[in-house]
Image (spheres, helix red, strand yellow):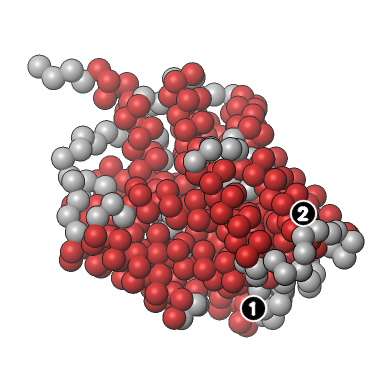
Amino acid sequence: MADTSSQDEDTAPKERTPLITIFLVFLRLGLTSFGGPVAHLGYFHEEFVGRRKWFQERAYADLVALCQFLPGPASSQVGIGVGLSRGGLPGALAAWLGFTMPSALALIAFGYGVIAYQNSINPGILQGLKVVAVAVVAQAVWGMARNLCPDAKRATLAVIAACLVLAAPTPLMQVGVIVLGGMAGLIFLRADTTQEHVSLGINVSRRLAVASLVTFFVFLVGLPILAGIFPSHTLALVESFYASGSLVFGGGHVVLPLLQAEVVPTGWVSDDVFLAGYGATQAVPGPLFTFAAYLGTVLEPMPNGVWGGLICLVAIFIPSFLLVVGALPYWDQLRKAKAMQTALLGINAAVVGLLLAALYDPVWTSAIHSAADFGLAMVLFTLLVFWKLPPWLVVILSAFGGWAITLLPSVL
């Protein structure tokens, strides 16, 4: 007879954890989780599977699979799922608040510093912060390509996606290549469907799930209509950041081209200020989506400052809540479907192409202006990928490197 004890343990209702405990656990993770989404998932595994035993191994793996399938920041969505498991909807909110608050506050403060001292900061330091974005995005492309494009078909799909986005750098094209990636996956790729599936063990009613999914699509379709009817800058901000949070596959780095397309062409944020903030985001722990808090702080029109930062932060994360709550009851059946798994292979390859295009434009074109910039970027990439230095240290070194470049002869 098969041993079902482990599965029973996975699917049994989880005991409630006090909200203050959930908040404090995630606050500690939000203060210490450096290294980006993949590292965050490792911290979560150590905390919730190894140390606290809140999840069994297979259940945690399934939760991660769900959040990687959904658009949005995977690590934050896993945190929301863990909070939902331990404390219901209030637990999900406590988990998100604890994990997000440290980096959001740090980036809002940095945004105020940019506003106040932009003209007095050594331009080499700001240039260094832009150059480190090249190294960080290149590292993300390197890692994602090795995992998500391990064969010729998927590598070719990624290159085609990158070329399409570079030829027509619009948010619509970025979404279109993801759709085309899924279609190409169905036609040309094959998924391994032999893996065992287990229930996530998180109880969400079908009624609540349906309401969440309906709300997600109502906002996605309705906000652009409202922003067109009522010319409000606040409404335009909410619409832009909600759409970015709804349409990003592949994690925090991939939000870069979407946000850049939303805030730079409109004149809300200059390219230099955008990339300087993105570089600074690598120096703080927690989710990369808190970059939205920085952008909301430094926006040219009102609202900006703290209120602008909070508006953009909440708007970009609302889709994550709605999608996690809406998808949980259906994931066990959906991820068993061979067609869905196969389409996901193509979507992941297209995501690599999207990030590859972002590496060139706007990151490379805005940051690399000389041989010295290129040399600094290569050094930073080596420190990140091969020497495994923490990102916050690499950001500091890049700022000093940018300053040092200004002292070199102009021939460089």
Which quarter of the figure is the N terminus placed in?
top left
The residue that label 2 is drawn on is 404
The x, y position of residue 80, in whole percent, is 51, 40
Q: Foreground residue, 405 or 188? A: 405
Q: Position of residue 92 (x, y in %)?
A: 54, 39
356 versus 75 height, above or below = below
Horizontal side of residue 95 vs 211, given as left or right: right
Residue 320 visible in image: no
Q: Residue furthest left?
A: 1
For disc 1, the marked residue is 265
Q: Which mark is residue 187?
A: none
Where is the C terminus found, in terms of image quarters? Answer: bottom right
**SS for callout 2:** helix
Task: Tell me the amino acid under the disc marked 1.
Answer: Pro
Q: Quadrant of residue 270?
A: bottom right
Q: Position of residue 184 (x, y in %)?
A: 24, 67
Q: Name which residue lies at 76% across and 68% down.
A: 410
Instruction: From the viewer's perspective, tell me whether residue 151 is left or right of residue 117.
Output: left
Q: Earlier in the sequence, mark 1 or mark 2?
A: 1
The quarter holding residue 294 reads bottom right
| In this view, 234 is above or below 248 | below
Q: Would you place residue 8 above or below residue 384 in this image?
A: above
**For residue 33, side relative to residue 170 (left or right):** right
- The amino acid at mark 2 is Ala
Q: Nearer the viewer, residue 86 or 102?
A: 102
How would you rate the neighbour count of disc 1 (Cα within 10 Å): few for under 14, some for 14-19, many for 20 or more?
few
Residue 83: horizontal and vertical position, in percent? Answer: 52, 34
